[in-house]
Image: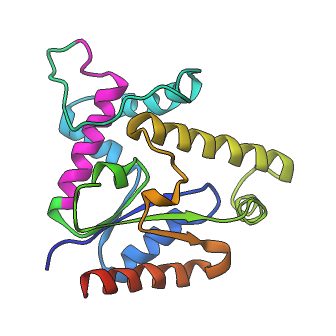
Amino acid sequence: MENVIVTIARQYGSGGKTIGEMYAKDQGINCYSREILRMASDDSGINEMLFNQADERLKGTTLFGWAKKVYKGDLIPPESDDFVSDKNLFNYQAKVIKQLAEQESCVLVGRCADFVLKDYPNVVSVFVHAPMDYCIARSLERSSITSEKEMEKFILKTDKFRGDYYHYYTGRTWNDARNYDLCLDSSKLGFEKCVEAIKGYVKLRFDR
């Protein structure tokens, strides 16, 4: 049976990463998130710290919200001055994502994996969302932030970055339902039923 890959994009506080991990555990497969940065570092020979710094640097640029460097699958060679550019750091992450998709069934959280794998027929793309009050309440349980108002600001800022990051590398709108196979409201279903919804979709689509 061909590998089945589930990609998870998620609003902050919606529990998307947890749902991805729960699905992976249920299926006996791996779930990859920030591990992709380490793997891209190992593959490219570029220090992992530079991959982490790239995200932080993009958060601070005023051009990030509207500029685009849509991923096209190319890699910049080591002899180029742009070898450690933000674009090439993303290219290596995308290379790892593609390798994982070809090697094993797995869950991939974030990193524009749905777009990177958009031409792969064995990919299920999922967007997990929830109302702001739910995201605030859940996030307050896991954070040193104690003010609802401050947490709302943090969530809005984080989701704006995720949307800008997605647009920067894909040219698409992050929270547009047309980009995904499944959009799940975790506040209505709960995590376990979100997992069941993904399993049901995979069964219907791939007969497994």
Residue 147 in sight here: no
> Is 37 in front, or is 111?
111
Q: Residue at x 42, y 38 (%)?
A: 171
Residue 62 placement: quadrant? top right
State left or right for residue 137 relative to residue 174. right
Does the magenta run of residues contain 12?
Answer: no
State left or right for residue 13 relative to residue 84. right
Residue 4: x percent and y percent?
Answer: 25, 72
Q: Residue at x 18, y 53 (%)?
A: 99
State left or right for residue 14 relative to residue 1. right
Residue 207: x percent and y percent?
Answer: 25, 87
Residue 52 placement: quadrant? top left
Q: In the rendered image of this protein, does residue 193 appear above or below residue 154?
A: below
Q: Residue at x 54, y 21 (%)?
A: 63
Q: In the rendered image of this protein, does residue 74 appear above or below residue 134?
A: above
The image quadrant where one finds the N terminus is bottom left
Q: In the rendered image of this protein, does residue 201 appear above or below residue 87?
A: below
The boundaries of the magenta stretch are: 81-101
View extreme (front): residue? 178
Residue 135 placement: quadrant? bottom right
Residue 170: x percent and y percent?
Answer: 39, 40
Residue 51 in sight here: yes
Our reading of the magenta stretch's main secondary structure is helix
> Is 7 in front, or is 26?
7
Does the magenta run of residues contain 98?
Answer: yes
The image quadrant where one finds the C terminus is bottom left
